[in-house]
């Protein structure tokens, strides 16, 4: 954990939790390794997700284009027949891709949960450091009380200078 003097010399800033947590991770190599493994899996998933989305987009584009082509047929019986086949094919495709969609959703949920855990760990691990700093470095209230007493006396003296 970071020493209180290190916090005191740096002061608070907009990224205090992240900076303190980075220092915590320097000392807790097991946790740092776990977080490295957590973040390392993300690029592979993004690549796999993009591959599925590209595959899906190609298939969806095909069905849209095929429906448009079929609608140009002059013979209504031919149009109805090919439209039924396209509809059936699209339903089969959607059915086959359901497991992919479920897995993608499962990954999204697990990733969100894991990211929440990382945030909670960061806050928990840095909270003790900050609270120790607060206890050990609280300004002396007596000085502030003395300042207030002086201000009160000066204010009261100023009041005596008012015209009656």
Image (spheres, rainbow, N blue to C red):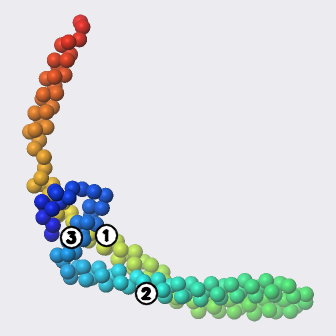
Q: Secondary structure at mark 1?
A: helix
Query: Measuring 26% from the left and 66% from the top, which residue is drawn there?
Result: 19
User: Is 76 left or right of 105, judged from the image as shown?
Assistant: right
In the drawing, what numbered circle is on residue 119? 1
Dot 3 alpha-carbon crowd within 10 angstroms: few under 14, some 14 to 19, many 20 or more: some
Q: Position of residue 125 (x, y in %)?
A: 21, 69
| CB within 8 Å, label 1 to label 3 | no
Q: Position of residue 15 (x, y in %)?
A: 30, 61
The correct choice, above or below, for 12 with respect to 76 in the image is above
| Res. 98 visible in picture | no
User: Is 54 left or right of 7, judged from the image as shown?
Assistant: right
The correct choice, above or below, for 92 with respect to 104 in the image is below
User: Is 137 left or right of 100, judged from the image as shown?
Assistant: left
Q: What residue does disc 2 label?
A: 44
What's the CA distance linking mark 1 and mark 2?
22 Å
Foreground: 107 or 53?
53
What's the CA distance linking mark 1 and mark 3?
15 Å
State which tag comes first along the sequence, 1 or 2.
Answer: 2
Q: What residue does disc 3 label?
A: 23
Q: Give the position of the N terminus as an image quadrant.
A: bottom left
Can you tell which of label 1 and label 2 is closer to the viewer? 2
State which tag comes first along the sequence, 3 or 2.
Answer: 3
Query: Measuring 43% from the left and 87% from the top, which residue is drawn there?
Result: 44
Residue 107 figure quarter: bottom left
Q: Position of residue 39 (x, y in %)?
A: 35, 80
Query: Measuring 20% from the left and 80% from the top, which residue is drawn there?
Result: 29
């Amino acid at each position: 954990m970071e020493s209180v003097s290190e916090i005191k010399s740096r002061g608070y800033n907009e990224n205090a939790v992240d900076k303190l947590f980075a220092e915590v991770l320097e000392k807790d190599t097991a946790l740092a390794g776990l977080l490295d493994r957590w973040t390392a899996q993300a690029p592979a998933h993004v690549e796999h997700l993009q591959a599925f989305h590209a595959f899906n987009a190609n298939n969806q584009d095909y069905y849209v284009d095929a429906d448009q082509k079929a609608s140009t047929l002059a013979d209504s019986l031919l149009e109805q027949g090919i439209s039924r086949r396209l509809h059936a094919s699209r339903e089969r495709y959607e059915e086959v891709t359901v497991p992919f969609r479920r897995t993608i959703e499962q990954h999204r949920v697990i990733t969100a949960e894991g990211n929440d855990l990382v945030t909670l760990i960061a806050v928990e691990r840095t909270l003790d450091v900050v609270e120790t700093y607060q206890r050990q470095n609280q300004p002396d209230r007596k000085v502030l009380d003395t300042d207030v007493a002086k201000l009160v006396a000066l204010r009261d003296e100023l009041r005596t200078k008012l015209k009656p």
